[in-house]
Image (cartoon, rainbow, N blue to C red):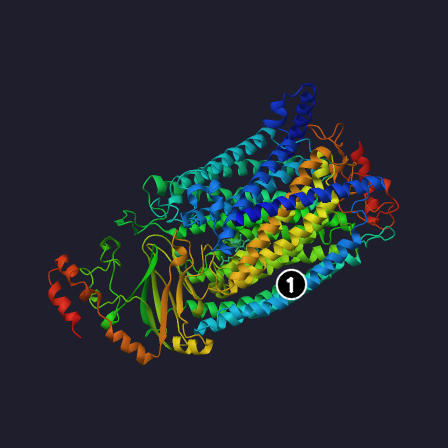
Amino acid sequence: MTGLLVLTGSILLVAAFALIYRILTLIEIAKGRQDYQPGGNSHAINGVLFILFFIVGFGLFFWYSGKAAENFLPEAASEHGKLTDRLFWITTGITFVVFFLTHALLFLSPYFFRYRKDRKALWWPDNTKLEVAWTVVPAIVLTILILGGWWIWRDVTAPAPDNSLEVEIVGKQFNWMVRYGGKDGKIGKHNFRKIDATNQLGMDFAADKSNFDDFVPREIHLPKGRSVLLKIRARDVLHSVFLPHFRVKMDAVPGMPTSFWFTPTKTTEEMRRELNDPNFNYELACTEICGQGHFAMRMVVVVSEPEEFEKWYASQEPWAKQNADYIASLNLENSKELAALFNQK
Amino acid sequence: MATVNIDLHHSVEEHVHHHDEHEHHHESFIRKYIFSEDHKVIAKQFLFTGIFWAIIGGLLSIIFRLQLGFPEANLEFLRPILGDWITAQGKLDQNFYLALVTMHGTIMVFFVLTAGLSGTFSNFLIPLQIGARDMASGFLNMLSYWFFFLSSVVMFISLFIETGPASGGWVVYPPLSALPQAMPGSGLGMTLWLISMSLFIVSSLLGGINYITTVINLRTEGMSFSKLPLTIWAFFLTAVLGLLSFPVLFAAALLLIFDRSFGTSFYLSEIYINGEALHNVGGSPVLYQHLFWFLGHPEVYIVMLPGLGITSEIIATNSRKPIFGYRAMIGSLLGITFLAFIVWAHHMFVSGMNPFLGTIFMFLTLIIAVPSAVKVFNYLATLWRGNIVFTPAMLFSIGLVSLFITGGVTGIALGNSAVDIQLHDTYYVVAHFHLVMGAASFFGMVAGIYHWFPKMFGRMMNEKLGYVHFWITFIGVYMVFFPMHYLGIAGFPRRYYSWTNFNAFDSFADLNAFISTAAIITMAAQLIFLFNFFYSIFRGRLAPANPWRSNTLEWTTPRFPGHGNWPGKIPTVYRWPYDYSKPGAKEDYIPQHIPYSETPESNLPHENELIALEKEFAK
Ligand code: HEM
Ligand SMILES: [Cu+2]
Ligand SMILES: [Cu+2]
C-alpha cells in the first residue's frame, strides 16, 4: 500500500517536472532568445528566497528547539554529567552565536549585493587586520573551551577513588552481563577459555578463590552518592557501555579491559518523582555496532539509597552457590570447602 | 635543482610531441571513449560512475530510512527487489539493515565523494586550469579509472550475494568484521569489501600521483604556485592527503585479511564466540581503529577540500570579486592538510585508549577548527559588496558554505573529549558529518557540475531547473539532517534498527517520520538534476566560449577541446586568477592569459613593473 503510494507519488512528481520544464522552455522560446546572461532575471527572486530561508529557518529552529527539549534526557544523574552537560550547552551557546551571525551575513548578502548591470563589485582582495582578527579570536575562544573540557576530562579519567564500588560489565552478542564482588567486594579473575554455556563470564575458580562469592544479578544496582567503577570487557566483538542518564560511555573491547567511574546522584525513585513517570528506569544501551541484536542490548539500572542498596547487595546469592553442580564438576581440590566457606550467610 | 629543471622541460616537450603525433592518427572508438588516456574523457568516466553510485547509495538510504521513519510499515512491496531480506512479517531483516547502512556509507564516502568528486574534477580541471595538454601520465590515469571500475564491479557484486554485503559499519571494525560467525555480512561480503577497497586504494594512489606530478611539473609558462587557482591548490593538497593516508588503510585492510584468512592475531584477542574460544591472543582491536582513522580523518578532508576549492572558484567568479584573502585561503588549506594527519584519535575518545592521548588529540582537533573558520570568513568577505550572479553553481556554493558552517560548529562540541563522551556514536555525530562532509561535499560536486558542464559537454544546463533543484535540495537537506541534532542530544545511538526497546529513546517517532519523508522528497528532487544533466548533454543550448566570464585558462580552449586541449600553443599566464572588477578595467574580469601590457588602465603600480618581465616571456 505504502509502496503504491510512493510509486504513484514519484510518477506524479516526475510528470509534473516534465510538464514544468516544457512550459518553461516554451516560454523562453516564445520570448525569443536574447543574449545569454548568466542568472538571467532571477537575481531578485533568489536573493529574496535566501532571506526567506533565513527567517523561516531560524523561526522553525527556535520554535522546534523548545518543543524538542521536552524529549531530551533529563538533567544528568551523575556528578561529572552535570559538568559535561554545562560545557556542552556553553559550547552550543557560543557556536550558536557564530552560526547565527555568519548565516545572517551569508543569507542577507545575496539579496543586497545581487547582480545589477550598473553596479560594480568592490575590489577588495584582502585585509590583513581582518584576517588576523578572525584567526586569533576563534583561536582564543577555542582555547578557553578546550581548557574547560580538559579540566573535566582530567577528573573523569583520573583513577577511581579507593572506596569505589566495583561492578563488572561484560558485553556479548546480544546482551549485557554484570557481576559484583560479593562479600569480599573483589571481582574474581576470569579466563576466556573457561567460558561455556553455564559459566558465561568465564570465572576462573581454579585461579582465584574470590570468584566464589561473586554474584551475577539480572539488573545493575547502584548506590546513590558513592563512586562506582565499571570494569568493562567484551566476550566476542566490540560493544560500548552507554548509560545515557549518567553521561557515561566506554567501549567494551575483547582482550582489553576498560573502565569508567562515576557517581550517581539521583535514585530511580527520585527520578520517577521528578519526571512524574512511575515507570521510569535508568537504562544501559550498546553504542558500538556489534551485529544483528545491537539495538536490543538493554539492561535496567536501579539506583537506590545506600542503605537500600546494602540490603539488596547482602541478599544476593553467589553464582557459585546457584551453580553448585558446575563447581563440583570442576573437580577442584578443595572446591567443596571453598564453596561452603563463601556460601555461608 | 638543475636536474629537476632539465627533467621538467624534457617531459613537457615530450608531451607536446607525443600529442602532435596523436592528432595524425584516427583514434578508434575504444581508445577514444573506453580505454582513453585523455584526462577529459577519464574525468567523465569518473563522473558517470560516480553518478551511478550516488543513485545506488541514495536508494539504499531510502530503504533504511523507511525502517526508521515508519517502523510499523509493511515493506512487503520491496520483496521483488530485496527477496528474503524482507522477513515473513514484511519487515526489513535486521542484519540487512546493517548491511544497508554499511554499504551506504562506503559507497558515499569512497565511491561518490572520493572517486566521483576528485576523480572527476581533479582530472578535468588540473590540466585545463594549469595549462597542460594532459596528465603527466595518461596511461596511469587510465589505469586509475579502470582500477576504480574493477573495484566498483566487485562492490556491486557484493550487494547481491546470499549472505549479504559487508555489514559492520563503513569503518568495519574488527572483531565484528574479522569473524564470519559474528554476522552474515562478515563472510563473503566482507571479503569482497576488502578486495574492492584494495583495488580502490590502488586507483586512488595512481590518480593521486598523477595529480601531484602534473601540478608540480606541467604548469604552463608563468603559472607559478602563487598564480594557481584555488581549485588546483585544493586538488593538489587533496592528492597529497590521499597519497600519504590511503597506504595506511591498505595496511589496515591487509592485516585484517590476514586475521580473517590466515589465522593471525593482529586485531583479535581472547574471543569466545558461538560456543567456542578462539585461539587468537595478543591482538588489539584498538590498533585497527588507529590505522583506520589515520586514513579516516584525512579522508574526510579528501572529500571536503575539492568542494572547498570548487566553491572558492565559483564564489569569486559569480561575486565578480577577487576571492578574499587568497594567501590566507592557501594558508588554511595547507594548515588543514597538515593538521588532518594529527587529529585522528578524536574518533576514539571512548575506545579505551589512554585518556592522556585523548587530551592531546582534543587540543590538536580544536586547532584544526581555526583554518576551517578562516575559510568561512573569507567566503563571507568575498560575497560582501560583490555583484552576485545567481547561477545554479553559485547557489550550490552558497549552500555549501552554509552547510559547512552548520556542520562545522558541532565539530567544536564533538572535539571536546569531555563533551564527546555523551555525544559519541549518537545521531549528533550523524548530523555533524552528514552536514559538514556529506551534504557540503555533495553540494560542491553538484556546483562543479553546473559550473563546468559547458566545458565538459559544450552545452549549457537549464538554469531554471537548476534553481528548482537547488531550493528543494537545500531545504530538503536541512530538513533531513538538522533534526538529527535533537535526536543526538536526546541520546539516540546510531546504527540502531529500532529505538523502541528503550524507554529513553522511545520518543521522537514523529520526528523520525518527518526526516524520512524529507529524505524521500530530497532524493526525488535529484531526478530534476538527472533529467537536466542528461537532457542537456544532447539538447542543451550550445555554450558560449566563456559563459561565466571567468578568468581561468579552461575557458580559452575551444568549445569542444580535443585531446591536447589547445589547438595551438598553450597560453602563457601573466596574472592571478582573481582579477574581477578591477578598478579601471574595461570589463569586470581579466583572464589570466592577458598580459599587463594590454591593461595599462587597471594595473597596480607593482604590476606595471612586471610588464618588462613579460617581454622576456614573449621571446
Ligand atoms: C571544525 C572542524 C571539525 C571538528 C573539530 C570535528 C570534530 C569531529 C569529531 C571530534 C568527531 C568524532 C565524533 C564522534 O564520533 O564522537 C567527528 C566525526 C566526524 N567528522 Fe568531524 N570535525 C570537524 C570538521 C569535519 C569536516 C570538515 C568533516 C568532513 C569534511 C568532518 C567529518 C567527520 C566525519 C565523517 C565524522 C564521523 C565518522 C564516523 O564516526 O563515522 N568533520 N568530527
Ligand atoms: Cu552493540
Ligand atoms: Cu575526524
Residue B249 at x, y percent in the picture? 47, 44
Nearer to the camera, B617 or B234:
B234
Residue extending farthest to the front is A1
How many labels were placed on the picture?
1
Residue A144 at x, y percent in the picture? 57, 69
Horizontal arrangement in the rendering, residue B241 relative to residue A257 (left or right): right
Residue A289 at x, y percent in the picture? 42, 53
Location of the C terminus of chain B by quadrant is top right
Residue A267 seen from this side: no
- The answer to whether mark 1 is within 8 Å of ligand 1 is no
**Amino acid type, residue under disc 1 in the picture:** Phe
What residue is drawn where x is 77% and y is 54%? A45
Q: Give the quadrant of ligand 2.
A: bottom left
Q: Which residue in the protein does label 1 denote? A: A99
What residue is drawn where x is 48% and y is 61%? B492
Horizontal arrangement in the rendering, residue A18 relative to residue A236 (left or right): right
Residue A195 seen from this side: yes
Horizontal arrangement in the rendering, residue B81 relative to residue B460 (left or right): left
**Helix, strand or loop for disc 1:** helix
Residue B469 at x, y percent in the picture? 68, 48
What residue is drawn where x is 43% and y is 76%? A271
Quarter of image, res A342 = bottom left
